[in-house]
């Protein structure tokens, strides 16, 4: 079974609109962390935001917020007031644990976001 | 100052050759990783090292051999390169678990093309 599922292979959004990128996850570990990364066409992986499983509040970082619904096992990324520079691949990832020695990130398949002027 | 630097950025080589990719981090992290991103952009863990010790080896062919001379360096050597090895290889490092709110930091990637 997929541990991280991103069901939107591609999205087109008008500039200045808000956009929600979906991510659901599957784990039986009570402690885990959820991450979002941005990969522009230049190829680098840019860390955007983190949500811990025990965090009471949804994470926010500037225009990025994470809509964390633990019971539904979803961790959607919300980008407010989208900009042309937001066009990129976006990856949701999970780290289960903390389990020392198994600190890998498991990634979803990504969503390609295109912002239309 | 680049946090995680990997070289080379591009590598084009013939089948059967042996090649290495180098990675260095100056973040003081204890754990380093190699990830492979295939042509469909899927990212998968290959190896992780903690303080020079191999921790994760995710069913990678033994033609791939990571080496960590110290906790700031993790190199990847690939023997007898095959066409299917063509991909982008990312080095990454992560902070201690107590700082797990910090993201894993990735290098800029090495695009390997085997012809």
Image (cartoon, rainbow, N blue to C red):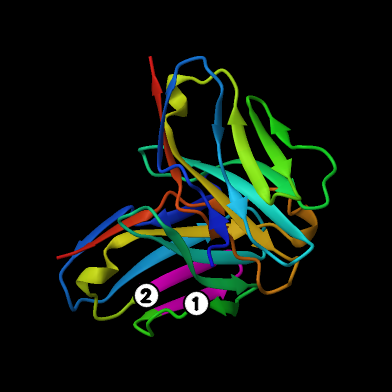
Q: Secondary structure at mark 2?
A: strand
User: On screen, A99 above or below A54?
Assistant: below
Q: Which residue is mark 2?
A: B77
Distance in Å between CA atoms under marks 1 and 2: 16 Å
Q: Position of residue A25 (x, y in %)?
A: 62, 55
Q: Describe the element under mark 1 as helix, strand or loop.
A: loop
Q: Residue at x 72, y 42 (%)?
A: A68
Image x and y of residue B50, in percent: 64, 72
**Residue visible at 53% across and 63% down in the picture:** A2
- Location of residue A102 by image quarter: bottom right
The front one of B114 and A64 is A64
- Asked if residue A79 lies in the magenta stretch, the reply is no
Which chain hosts label 2?
Answer: B
Can you name the residue that lies furthest to the bottom here? B62
Residue stretch rendered in magenta on the structure = B65-77
Look at mark 1 in the image and give the residue it sits on: B58
Q: Determine whether, in the image, residue B24 is placed left or right of residue B8.
A: right
The subunit letter for the residue under badge 1 reads: B
Tell me residue A95's x, y (percent).
Answer: 65, 60
Q: Would you say the magenta stretch is mainly helix, strand or loop?
A: strand
Looking at this view, is B99 or A61 the one in front? A61
């Amino acid at each position: 079974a997929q541990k991280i599922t991103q069901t939107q292979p591609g999205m087109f959004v008008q500039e200045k609109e808000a956009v929600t990128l979906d991510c659901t996850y599957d784990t039986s570990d009570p402690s885990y962390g959820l991450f979002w990364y941005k990969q522009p066409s230049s190829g680098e992986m840019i860390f955007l935001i983190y949500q811990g499983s025990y965090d009471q509040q949804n994470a926010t970082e500037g225009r990025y917020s994470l809509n964390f619904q633990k019971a539904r096992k979803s961790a959607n990324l919300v980008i407010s007031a989208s900009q042309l520079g937001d066009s990129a691949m976006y990856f949701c990832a999970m780290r289960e644990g903390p389990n020392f020695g198994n600190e890998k990130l498991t990634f979803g398949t990504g969503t390609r976001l295109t912002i239309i002027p | 100052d680049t946090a995680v630097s990997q070289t080379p950025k591009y590598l084009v080589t013939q089948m059967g050759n042996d090649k290495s990719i180098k990675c260095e981090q100056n973040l003081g992290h204890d754990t380093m990783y190699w990830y492979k991103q295939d042509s469909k952009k899927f990212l998968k863990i290959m190896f992780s090292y903690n303080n020079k010790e191999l921790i994760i080896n995710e069913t990678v062919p033994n033609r791939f051999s990571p080496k960590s001379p110290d906790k700031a360096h993790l190199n990847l050597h690939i023997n007898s390169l095959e066409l299917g090895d063509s991909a982008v290889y990312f080095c990454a490092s992560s902070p201690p678990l107590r700082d797990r709110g910090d993201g894993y930091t990735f290098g800029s990637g090495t695009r390997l093309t085997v012809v």
